[in-house]
Amino acid sequence: MSVSCVWRGLLRSVLLLACLLPTYAAADSWFVDELNKDRKSVLFGFVGGLFAHELGHMSVATMRGIDFEFDGVSIVYPEPALSDKNRLLVASAGFQVQWLASEIAFHYLEKRKDDATSVNAAAGVVLSHLGITAAYLTFLRNHAKGDIEGMSEATGISNDRLALAVAIPALLDGWRLFGTATPAWVPTVSALTKGAGVAWAWTY
């Protein structure tokens, strides 16, 4: 893939984030009690968020011409001489897509309050983002086939520092989902940290 194609893709991502900037939102009206009213929609959104994370890995690998295969529930890349750049991109792709998905979900949480099904499915997407991140902060942080480990191998940055970096937007998004009267800076900072993470991965 040419450098110009990569930059066009990155530019589209930045423009999309810029377009979403005025809609950065917090749920504020969504509470765990909603889960008991419509578990099916929340579960649908949660599973969709998990799928989006894995689809991110597969999409970036395909775009970069990298072979991948499944090893149980893990996606692995059998190419023996995978470059650090490609390793970073495929390892971080799941986080990148779940960040974007969570921003779209928060848009629905704020703008579609009259549609309980959409709101609860959107909350499920955010919950999957929080759940995936929690897994990578704990038992998957040093997993040999995990995303954090792959990012660390590509960059030389410690697993702990990378885990902290992905924890920041997740913590802010937890505040956005469960908090009340969430300060306006919380969604803005969360979205900006996600955008910075995407830009870092593609320009590293």
Image (tube, rainbow, N blue to C red):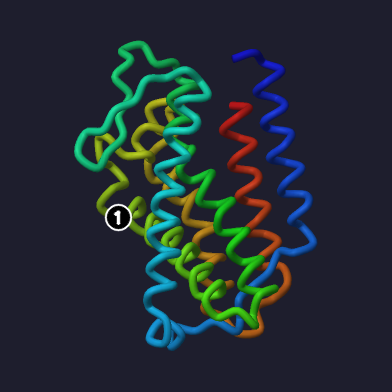
Judging by the rendered image, the residue that carries numbered circle 1 is 138
Left or right: 82 as drawn, with respect to 29: left
Q: Horizontal and vertical percent for residue 17?
A: 71, 49
Q: Horizontal and vertical percent for residue 151?
A: 42, 33
Q: Horizontal and vertical percent for residue 105?
A: 58, 63
Quarter of the figure with the N terminus: top right
Left or right: 68 as drawn, with respect to 99: left
Q: Residue at x 76, y 42 (%)?
A: 15
Q: Nearer the viewer, residue 165 or 144?
A: 144
Q: Nearer the viewer, residue 61 or 139?
A: 61
Quarter of the figure with the C terminus: top right
Q: Work out whether 140 lies above or below 178.
A: above
Secondary structure state at the residue bearing disc 1: loop
Left or right: 168 as drawn, with respect to 191: left
Q: Work out whether 136 lies above or below 180.
A: above
Q: Nearer the viewer, residue 198 or 13?
A: 13
